[in-house]
Image: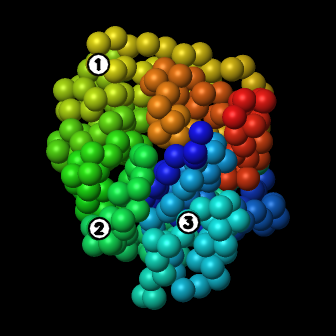
Amino acid sequence: MAAPHILVVGSINIDIVALVERLPTPGETVTGGTLLVNHGGKGANQAVAAARAGGKVSFVGAYGADAFGAAARDRLLREGINVDYFQCVRDAPSGVALILVDGVTRENLIAVAKSANDAVDSAMVSDARTAFQSASIVISQLEIRDGAIEAAARICHDLGKPFLLNPAPSRLLPKRIYESLHVIVVNEHEARDVTGKSDLRESVSSLHELGCKNVVVTLGSEGVMFSEGATLESIEAPKVRAVDTTGAGDCFVGWLGVGIAEGLSLRAATERACKAASLKVTREGAQTGMPYRHEVLGDRS
């Protein structure tokens, strides 16, 4: 079977992480610890996950004319991802997240400055219409402007392409975007943020009322809930010893998108994505820890 074309519209960041003995208080300096520089950004994470899942991936996004941007572009190329629509923005730096992590509690402090990710707008997305035309599915998140999401939704609707949205970080969107979605993927906190409902079953019902055809709620180690409108079903996650949960949700989204593009049922695609995400958390690194297709499917293609 030919690899499906997966189009990811989203963000890319370089994560600069300081793993310290304890988090500093305001005005305090904590010395020592370990410095880590990782590739991240929800869009790039999902693109890498989809590529390793067997998709032929193209990425729509932006980076700055700096060393971080060059490194991010090279990273995508090494994963076999098409960067024809990954644009260099001269008047903004590449996306960078500054992260302090408590080495004992694993609590963190994160700051993300304005960057080239903010340049991903409706015009940039519209310029990639050719990529939409050949796509089997389009995936996006909310680390880029609402205008870019609206443009992606409009083009998917016009071309009859399935649109998968992971609304993270969560914020409310126009109803017409929800109505354009083939599937929305949220964790339990995002589901409550978007709908205002504390009960997950009520949240799922509300997402359907907003217009979402298929709803998937990830529950971490508890597995996944999904609904195609009539009933709410559950899938348990494989029991593993988690080492690093960073990027697990993005892993799930990338694999789910590939499964849907390959024609799997929502249940089958969700089960496979859940298995992949469970394998990811046993490894360090958001992108480096993403599993390959043969690791999840065994000897099957």
Upstream in sequence: badge 1 or badge 3? 3
Q: Quadrant of residue 172?
A: top left
Q: Amino acid at mark 3?
A: Asn
In the rendered image, residue 54, in percent from the top left (x then y), is placed at 63, 45
Question: If the image is split into quadrants, where does the C terminus sit?
Answer: top right
Question: If the image is split into quadrants, where does the N terminus sit?
Answer: top right
Residue behind mark 1: 229
Q: Marks 1/2: CA distance?
A: 31 Å
| Left or right of 164, for residue 151 | left
| Element assignment for label 3 | loop
Judge the density around disc 1: few (<14), some (14-19), many (≥20) Cα neighbours within 10 Å.
some
Q: Are marks 1 and 3 in contact (CB under 8 Å)?
A: no
Above or below, 183 against 155 in this view is above
Residue behind mark 2: 126
Q: Amino acid at mark 2?
A: Ser
Say which residue appears at 45% left-offset and 88% top-offset. Answer: 90
| Element assignment for label 1 | loop
| Element assignment for label 2 | helix
In the rendered image, residue 38, in percent from the top left (x then y), is placed at 69, 62
Say which residue appears at 60% left-offset and 27% top-offset. Answer: 272
Mark drawn on residue 82: 3
Q: Quadrant of residue 91?
A: bottom left
Q: Which marked residue is nearer to the observer: mark 1 or mark 2?
A: 2
Q: Is residue 232 visible?
A: yes
Q: Is residue 104 visible?
A: no
